Image: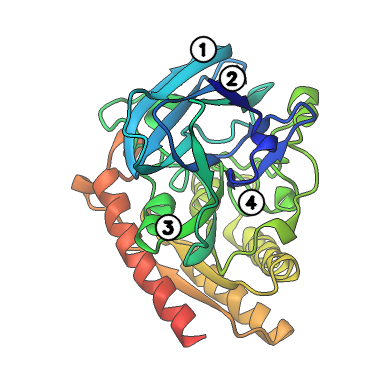
Amino acid sequence: MKEYRPAELPELERLGRTAVCEDGSLAVFWTASGAELTLTATDLSMEVDSQYGSLELWIDVMIDGECSQRIRLPRGRSHIPVFQGMDATRERVVRILRDTQAMAQDGVSVLRILKIETDDGAVFRKAEEPALRLEVIGDSITSGEGAGLERQIEWAPIVFSAIHSYGYLTAEKLHARVQILSSSGWGLYASWDANTDCALPPYYNEVCGLASGEKNASFGAQAPWDFASYRPDCIVINLGTNDSGALKNQDRWTKEEYQPLFIDTAVSFLKNLRAKNPQAYLLWAYGMLGNDMAGWIREAIDRYVRESGDGRVSYFEFANCTEDRLGVRYHPNRLAHEEAAAALAGEIQRVLSRN
């Protein structure tokens, strides 16, 4: 058997915002992030390291687009057998994906891919260039909360799913790469419980800045993101649902007080997205669990266009989930994500063909 560090394999595709550590391992923080290998081999396994506080990490092992394993990782090192005794003449595409979203509330939450192990005759190939590159920014809906398990009521990592989320499914439909930045309960300006520290825009320029603390930092979470390493053709923003919750469930602001805070933040965020991604189309896709903020989002987009002259931005509204499309904790279930992905994929094709 041969062993490789991820950094030693130029054919290895880094999926999502990840960081290469000094020892050559790959640190993974966000949902649907990880590594992809295109290879011919009879045997393949991986060694991983899982570090977390109280919120365990789950991974998906994908072979040619099928989920062959969904694994709850213990703390520390684990050996993951991917396949054994397979036809050495057949090429396969293997993905190891973090199923669990970035967990800001845990002291440390990192998956590291330490080693790739194959038979001596294994041959790796660089993956073909994807048709598109996408980036999706959102909250629990984007993290796939309720798409992992649909009949449980606890808020726990097991109820999340990367591969059944609309962002991942949209990418699959478009034969695209995708990187997803999302956190349950977080918003554009404030979280569902009116915490302004739990907002995505301030952390956008870092690998995974919401993963705070020295341990996460030691693995590269808080380092500046290299925007040249991944140039999305389309950035999808699905933020606003938790801001609506901040208004409904708290008395910190009146609606009149919150509106300018929300709109100013949205305009500033769009400007930062454009500055960091000059080539990308910006698509604010909102909904599934209500559309209370739609008017403010449209107002922010209109103001951004007036101030910047940028015409490569638009608004798209998801259909709201009916009762039979809701899973755990009143979040979209798998069928809802599939329908949202179909609608979003069509809209992305439409705006990109037009632009």
The residue indicated by pointer 3 is 171
Residue at 53%, 63% (x, y): give it.
133
Which residue is at the far front? 121
The answer to the question of whether label 2 and label 4 lie on touching residues, with beta carbons closer than 8 A, is no
Of callouts 3 and 4, the N-terminal one: 3
- Residue 114 visible in rendering: no
Residue type marked 2: Ser
Element at badge 1? loop
- Position of residue 316 measured from the top left corner of the image (x, y, whole percent): 43, 71
The answer to the question of whether label 3 and label 2 lie on touching residues, with beta carbons closer than 8 A, is no
Give me the C-alpha separation between circle 3 and circle 1.
Answer: 30 Å
Above or below — where is 304 with respect to 238? below
The answer to the question of whether label 4 and label 1 lie on touching residues, with beta carbons closer than 8 A, is no
Left or right relative to 293: residue 196: right
- Position of residue 259 measured from the top left corner of the image (x, y, whole percent): 62, 64
Of callouts 4 and 1, the N-terminal one: 1
Left or right relative to 42: residue 273: right
Of callouts 2 and 4, the N-terminal one: 2
- Specify the quadrant of the image occupied by residue 235: bottom right
The residue indicated by pointer 4 is 253
The answer to the question of whether label 2 and label 1 lie on touching residues, with beta carbons closer than 8 A, is yes
In this rendered view, identify the residue nearer to me: 147 or 224: 224
Give me the C-alpha separation between circle 3 and circle 2.
Answer: 27 Å
Residue type marked 3: Ala
- Residue 220 visible in rendering: yes
Element at badge 3? helix
